């Protein structure tokens, strides 16, 4: 099981970078950052953040948690993350998510009512444009269709530790199931037997405390 940390983006961009550097020094496998466009978050451009983190680190895996497949142009996503994939080969994967804030959809000229068909359409476009892509995960909180999509394409499924309704549906269909879990509580997340477990952190002290529990 890979163990890492994630931030929703509550810190400043510079602080997010320092969290990643600290996580690598503490021995964690993965650092992930979510994409948010509304206050109080500061992670509206995860590709930029992860590129800077890649330049400041040497081995830790870099991921999104998540990047919005609905409001972003899939061609732009392919261009940005493919570039990062070349700059940090073997260190990137991507978690795709729908988003759940209506006003953010409006800012990008989309409507939240169409988020599910947008997810499926944009995912297929992204996949067609990006052949040499790293591993892709799908964030699934409420829609069984997302679990089905992940299973159909042999991708991973990411869930919150308290939102696991479609995990068994995914595992029963996927040829090579890979489960990721985002959690605020290490023990609760580990109970799900994930392939990747990411624990929420806000400060370097949080990382140190987590490292003491996982060493």
Image (cartoon, helix red, strand yellow):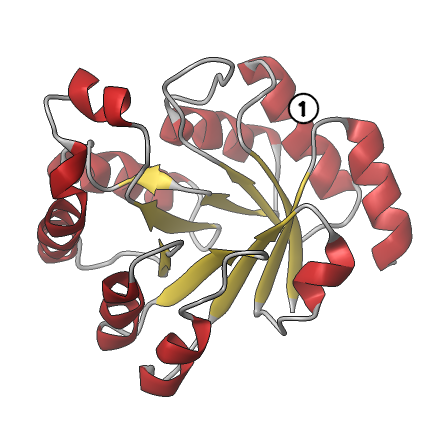
Point out residue 98 in the picture as x, y percentages from the top left corner. 28, 43
Point out residue 49 in the picture as x, y percentages from the top left corner. 46, 25
On the question of residue 175 being in view, the answer is no
- Could you say which quadrant of the image residue 107 lies in? top left
Most foreground residue, 197 or 215? 197
Point out residue 39 in the picture as x, y percentages from the top left corner. 46, 13
Instruction: Please report the residue visible at 60 percent of the width from the left and 29 percent of the height from the top.
Output: 56
Badge 1 is on which residue? Answer: 18
Most foreground residue, 176 or 51? 176
In the image: residue 96, left or right of residue 128: right
Instruction: Please report the residue visible at 32 percent of the width from the left and 48 percent of the height from the top.
Output: 96
- Could you say which quadrant of the image residue 80 lies in? top left
Quarter of the image that includes the C terminus: bottom right
Q: Where 9 falls versus 73 (above or below)? A: above
Most foreground residue, 177 or 105? 105
- Could you say which quadrant of the image residue 85 lies in? top left
10 Å neighbourhood of mark 1: few (<14), some, or many (≥20)? some
Count of marks overlaid on the render = 1
Q: Where 112 falls versus 82 (above or below)? A: above
């Amino acid at each position: 099981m890979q163990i890492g940390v994630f931030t929703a983006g509550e810190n400043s961009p510079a602080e997010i970078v320092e969290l990643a550097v600290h996580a690598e020094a503490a021995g964690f496998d993965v650092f992930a950052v979510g994409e948010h466009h509304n206050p109080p978050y500061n992670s509206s451009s995860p590709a930029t953040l992860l590129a800077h983190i890649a330049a400041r680190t040497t081995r830790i895996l870099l991921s999104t948690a998540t990047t919005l497949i609905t409001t972003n142009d899939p061609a732009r996503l392919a261009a940005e993350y493919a570039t990062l994939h070349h700059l940090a080969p073997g260190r990137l994967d991507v978690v795709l998510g729908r988003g759940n804030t209506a006003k953010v959809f409006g800012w990008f000229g989309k409507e939240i009512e169409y988020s599910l068909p947008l997810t499926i359409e944009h995912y297929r476009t992204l996949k067609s444009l990006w052949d040499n892509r790293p591993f892709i995960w799908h964030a699934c909180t409420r829609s069984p269709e997302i679990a089905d999509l992940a299973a159909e394409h042999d991708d991973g499924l990411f869930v919150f530790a308290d939102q696991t309704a479609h995990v068994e549906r995914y595992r029963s269909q996927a040829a090579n199931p890979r489960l990721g879990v985002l959690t605020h509580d290490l023990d609760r997340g580990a109970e799900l037997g994930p392939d990747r477990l990411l624990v929420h952190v806000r400060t370097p002290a949080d990382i140190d405390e987590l490292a003491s529990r996982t060493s």
